[in-house]
Amino acid sequence: MSLLTKALEGIITPEMDQVAAQENVSPEFIRQGVAAGRIVIPCNFHHKTIVPIGIGNGLRTKVSASIGLYGNNAVIDEEVKKIKTALTAGTDALMDLSVSGDIDTMRKETLNSASVPVGTLPVYQAIAEAGEKYGSSVKMDAEEMFEVIERHAADGVDFLALHCATTMDVVERAKKEGRIDPLVSYGGVHLIGWMIANQCENPLYEQYDRVLEIARKYNVTLSLADGMRPGCLADSLDGAQVQELVILGELVRRAREGGVQIMIKGPGHMPLDHVKATVTLQKSLCKGAPYFVFGPLLTDIAAGYDHINAAIGGAISAWAGAEFLCYVTPAEHIGVPSIDQVREGVIAARIAAHAGDLAKGMKEAHQWDLEMSMARKNLNWKRQLELALDPQRAKEIRKTRNSGESSACAMCGKYCAMEIVAKYLNTTKHSC
């Protein structure tokens, strides 16, 4: 019996208990959220090392980091190091986006290395295998796509990203509208290429009940991605994107009726003034399903700094109602991220998630900031460093940029305004 089915029957599972304890809410709150589809708990029955997390309304905004084999120089050991770095930096989930090499082994290493939920895009592997077997991905058949989807589910993948709503009608609309950047989704563009070359409808849409059957069998959460996500600001909220979102809403309904947990993964580039409207539209059309946002990126010109670009977009999206942020690294658009850039991406996304939680009035988020404010007021450096979102980085800067002669900050030194005012007001002060 799937987690959603149990929730609908009034059963509180151990996974719901665990999430409730993490979030400091009641197990019944979690059960009701799962039953309504506003909360998902990605936890494949076959992923033995997982510690379940909740994603959705009323819960802390979560962050996902992406790793995976890409290109001839990619090696599994290097990607495992990135996994460990992302986990140390505090990611809540991982996505293995491998497109080449020994994809099966990479996926199993990811699952074995991670206590967090793991997601994949099975079509990536189907494309790679068809390329090796036939010389072109357009020669694969639908059965091969479904075989790879079930392979991922059977291995223990917790959430599957699939382009089930990218139909021929949506593709035709995109053609008529003359997009500047027609397609930027790697999986989406290959799937659409297959559809056009074979003059066939998207099998993931036509055989959606089969997708649901696989997801239900392994208790996999679906993460339906938009193949028409805008790759530049000029294409944001165009007809093709919105039409696909309407179809996604219908697929959300069918998934819930089929006992399958589901969330929606959405847009890439958009101007700041489109963020709230996009999240509101998704929430309305997709009936409150958790929103997993990629970025969004609020400008097209931030190459090398897109982790900052995405953090701004992610914070605003979280405030508007998104619950899950896909990290973006400084290497976005221009290369494969290094281990250090993976860490930067996770930290930037966590800052965005926390800022969003503050704006949504999350009590735990406000308490964390209040404790930091008190530590700063009291010039308690030890506590400030402990409370920092990235204590390692904060300690490095404090050690290298401060003489240690004063409890005051490196900027003011013995003339610290905090110390002067504290003495005048006879306020208690503690230093490390």
Image: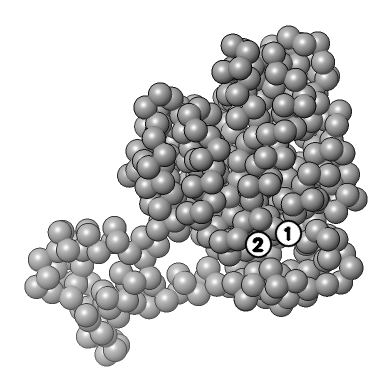
Toward the viewer: 400 or 106? 106
Q: Residue 179: give x, y in percent of width and height.
A: 66, 15
The disc at residue 54 is: 2
Amino acid residing under circle 2: Gly
The disc at residue 39 is: 1
Q: Is residue 130 visible?
A: yes
Relative to 84, say whether 363 is above or below: below
Q: In this view, does 199 lie to the left or right of 411?
A: right
Q: Is residue 284 left or right of residue 263?
A: right
Toward the viewer: 142 or 402? 142
Amino acid residing under circle 1: Ile
Toward the viewer: 136 or 279? 136
Number of other residues with Cα within 10 Å of mark 2, as a class: few under 14, some 14 to 19, many 20 or more: many
Quadrant of res 190: top right
The disc at residue 176 is: none
Residue at 85% x, 54% y is 259
CA distance for labels 2 and 1: 7 Å
Q: Is residue 117 left or right of residue 410?
A: right
Number of other residues with Cα within 10 Å of mark 1, as a class: few under 14, some 14 to 19, many 20 or more: many
Disc 1 is placed on an element classified as: strand
Q: Residue 46: give x, y in percent of width and height.
A: 66, 55
